[in-house]
RNA sequence: GGAGAGAUGGCAGAGUGGUCGAAUGCGCGUGCUUGGAAAGCACGUGUAGCCGCAAGGCUACCGGGGGUUCGAAUCCCUCUCUCUCCGCCA
């Protein structure tokens, strides 16, 4: 959510910033609601003020006195009017809130212009993704793949996109998660194991609601949402709290399974491990002082990159253009790993600065030393990392002539073998 | 799942229809005192919205929502959460 004062005082700047995201918002409509709301508010407050004054006067009068009775009669009318106007005020308030929730975050000045994914800027390229890999295959074509990653039985038991990981398949997933968590701990992120269901208030605070309602699995009858990413419970950890300024920045990481309905996806995107309804991911999250948030974003991105470097996987970093930025992000980098068998880049991490957009929805603040007043923190998050696509790249890039997959040296202590043998 | 008790400011804890944004204590801040500190003393100490150039003013908030009333922290309904006992259970 944006600061209402921002759209009220500098609507043209807001309009221009939203245009950079290639989104359309009825800003004039929002401003009109705002004007009506403020008028109604002043009306109601004047009536309440009248009631309060009468209240004080009546307290001093003898209960049954003629003056008292006259006052009751007089105030009945005021009370009725106040009630009536309050209904109008509440309606406008809700309308305004909904309108504000529908306004996207504004992009940072350093975000490049652009409309589509083709307009994203290649910010960095790491590793020799073009090196010849004569044995590379799309991972789902590797002999024995379906034994370790059993999609057929997953579909039977649950549905498409919910595979079983069996034997070496389960162990390589566990090894990757363990590796990620250990590396992140070394980088200063405190590990958290959060709830994997959240309530509507939490999903609203991070921006999943009302914007992406259909993307989450929802439970009945309790109306909880299966987390699409650990970002949601993690960010909400400090919801409605004021943290110590000296505690900032706060670094946390969490492993959770992630659940996404992925309605509308199709084709090559959903083959094999490319896109699942349930997948494992470690998320990095920071609550930071606004003055440091862009430096902290760069650091978080570097932390995520280091994981790919240690796994010796070629990757690139995209700086997302305005049109490809999400609803809530002010700036975003995507990390994409090279998948030698598919000959394409797979997104394995998305590192974003939300500035105060989530913090305002979630009311996460710190008490500023200077002002003495609560101020909104900035939130930053990114994957570190998402398992299935890293695994896909690892399988494809490291496939050898004999059909085995070489395990990266850093992962061997976690996996316990030097090769994945498909046995 | 059943029965009962409870939810008040940073914390503890009063307050059962009117002058209560809320006693008191603790904590915190500033000042006095001191060689310095402690103690003591004095004053101050919530969040948010609206109006205003400002000084300032007004309004809301006693777990959430709704109701009764001229008037609600206080009465009624409802939801959520916490605690105690019972049941069940990894």
Image (cartoon, coloured by chain):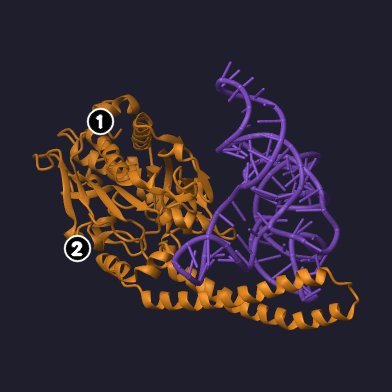
Quarter occupied by residue A321: bottom left
Quarter occupied by residue A207: bottom left
Tell me if I can see residue A155 in this picture.
yes
Residue assigned mark 2 = A114
Say if A340 sits above or below A23 in the image.
above
Front position in the image: B16 or A393: B16
Earlier sequence position, callout 2 versus callout 1: 2
Tell me if I can see residue A210 in this picture.
no
Say if B44 sits above or below A11 in the image.
above
Figure chain in orange? A
Near mark 1 (Cα within 10 A), the count class, few <14, some 14-19 or many ≥20, is many
Whether residue B11 sits left or right of residue A228 in the image: it is right
Q: Position of residue A64 (x, y in %)?
A: 91, 76
* SS at mark 1 in the image: loop
Say if B22 sits above or below B30 in the image.
below
Figure chain in purple? B
Q: Position of residue A1 (x, y in %)?
A: 42, 61
């Amino acid at each position: 959510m944006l600061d209402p004062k921002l759209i009220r005082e500098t609507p043209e700047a807001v309009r221009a910033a939203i245009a950079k995201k290639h989104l359309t918002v009825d800003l004039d409509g929002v401003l009109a609601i705002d004007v009506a709301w403020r008028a109604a508010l002043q009306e109601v407050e004047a009536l309440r003020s009248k009631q309060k004054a009468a209240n004080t006067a009546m307290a001093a009068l003898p209960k049954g006195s003629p003056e008292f009775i006259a006052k009751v009669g007089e105030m009945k009318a005021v009370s009725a009017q106040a009630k009536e106007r309050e209904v109008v005020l509440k309606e406008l308030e809700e309308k305004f809130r909904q309108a504000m929730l529908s306004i996207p975050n504004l992009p940072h000045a350093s975000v490049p212009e652009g409309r589509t994914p083709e307009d994203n800027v290649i910010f960095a390229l790491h590793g020799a993704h073009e090196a010849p890999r004569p044995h590379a295959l799309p991972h789902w074509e590797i002999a024995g793949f379906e034994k370790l990653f059993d999609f057929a039985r997953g579909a039977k038991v649950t549905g498409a996109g919910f595979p079983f990981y069996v034997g070496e398949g389960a162990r390589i997933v566990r090894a990757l998660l363990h590796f990620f968590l250990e590396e992140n701990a070394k980088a200063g992120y405190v590990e958290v194991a959060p709830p994997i269901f959240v309530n509507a208030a939490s999903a609203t605070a991070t921006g999943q609601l009302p914007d992406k309602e259909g993307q989450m699995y929802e439970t009945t009858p309790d109306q909880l949402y299966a987390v699409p990413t650990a970002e949601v419970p993690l960010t909400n950890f400090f919801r409605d709290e004021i943290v110590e300024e000296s505690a900032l920045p706060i670094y946390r990481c969490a492993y959770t399974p992630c659940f996404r309905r992925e309605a509308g996806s199709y084709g090559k995107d959903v083959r094999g491990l490319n896109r699942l309804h349930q997948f494992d991911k470690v998320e990095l999250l920071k609550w930071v002082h606004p003055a440091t948030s862009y430096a902290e974003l760069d650091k978080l991105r570097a932390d995520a990159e280091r994981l790919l470097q240690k796994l010796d996987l070629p990757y690139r970093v995209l700086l997302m253009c305005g049109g490809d930025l999400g609803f809530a992000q002010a700036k975003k980098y995507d990390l994409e790993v090279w998948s030698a068998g598919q000959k394409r880049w797979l997104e394995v991490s998305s590192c974003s600065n939300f500035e105060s957009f989530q913090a305002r929805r979630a009311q996460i603040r710190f008490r500023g030393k200077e002002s003495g007043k609560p101020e909104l923190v900035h939130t930053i998050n990114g994957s570190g990392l998402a398992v299935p696509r890293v695994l896909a790249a690892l399988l494809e890039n490291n496939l050898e002539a004999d059909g085995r997959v070489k395990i990266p040296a850093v992962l061997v202590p976690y996996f316990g073998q030097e090769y994945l043998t498909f046995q």
